[in-house]
Amino acid sequence: MPTTMTKASLLILAAALVTVASAQNRGQQNFDNVEIHTLQLRDNMYMLVGAGGNITVQVGKDGVLLVDTEYAQLSNKILAAIRKLSPEPIHYIINTHYHGDHTGGNENIRKAGNTIAGGNVAGDLGAEASEGAAIVAHNNVLLRLSMPNGNQPAAPQGGWPTDTYLSDMKKMWFNGEGIVLFHPEHAHTDGDSIVYFKRNDVIATGDIFTMTTYPIIDLNGGGSFQGMIDAVNQILDLTDTVYGQDGGTLIVPGHGRLCDTGDLLNYREMITIIRDRIVDMIHKGMTLGQVKAAHPTLDYDPLYGTSTGFWTTDAFVEAAYKSLSQTAKKK
């Protein structure tokens, strides 16, 4: 069963849980050994921690809504964890972006739910789109999941979004609560959604904000360094803080422990300082090799740096240099 605790206790426990989950995610996958841990955020909201991106769950009389679905291999464990929270049907899955550690379980979990009658579904997906839970995302997520990427085939059609939006905002109402999806352009990817639960004052950020690595800038997926900073500032504009005590907006990052506004402020400071350092080096005419040799991230490496896995410190600096070089040339 989920554990109800103060926010301070949640922060401590979540940090321990995600250390294990992050190691499993970044190294060789062994999903048999992965456990799904449940943390209660508010009366009817939870955070599920496994081996992929964090999952946010809202439950109530209308049913169950999820933000992201981790990996397909964990779907049965995730569904079992959800059933401990609510017997009601899963009606909505919201995807924060297209990456497989956040969307891999779409098809399996969608099949376990159902779409509310009269819901909007993507036009030419056929009758199949109305079966199972609705998958909500920015339209660029549908485009990227439905097209092959290099040697990677398109994702299974059953996991594609069935309800998409094109503007910078989409509003929903579920379980007596207004839910707003904000789309920042060219942040982590070109299809990000920031998911804001207004009554509960909970924000799911996807990989715009992570606590386990430097910012992941998916250049091939339409991401940009400055866009990440702009998106973090957009999230901060939504938050409220109670200083000196538990309270205020709760923030579920894409990876890592449960956070609050103070954590996001520290993150913004880090990425802003590193941006300014790299931009200064670009203006001085330094090459990528020279920038790497100058170690612009050195003082933050103990917190965010790594030399192993898919997103190393070196990979981050290279992506930052490429992205900021494009911006610098326009000025």
Image (cartoon, rainbow, N blue to C red):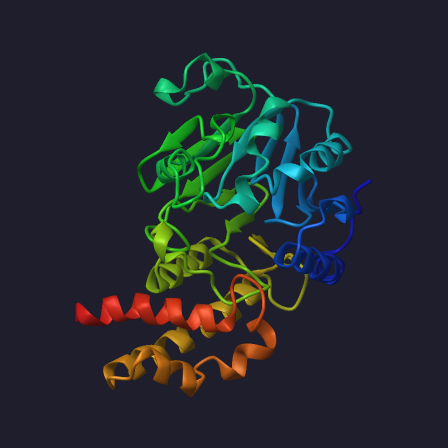
Looking at the rendering, in which quadrant would you find the N terminus?
A: top right
Quarter assignment of residue 231: bottom left
Vertical position of residue 158 compared to residue 191: above or below: above
- Please tell me which residue lies in front, 231 or 153: 153
Q: Residue at x 59, y 62 (%)?
A: 242
- Whether residue 195 can be seen here: yes
Q: Residue at x 56, y 73 (%)?
A: 307
Q: Residue at x 27, y 80 (%)?
A: 282
Is 207 situated left or right of 1 in this image? left
Q: Position of residue 214 (x, y in %)?
A: 51, 67
Looking at the rendering, in which quadrant would you find the C terminus?
A: bottom left
Vertical position of residue 181 compared to residue 172: above or below: below
Q: Position of residue 44 (x, y in %)?
A: 68, 37
Q: Position of residue 260 (x, y in %)?
A: 59, 60
Residue lying furthest front in this view?
151
Number of numbered tags placed on the structure image? 0
Q: Position of residue 234 (x, y in %)?
A: 40, 56
- Whether residue 44 can be seen here: no
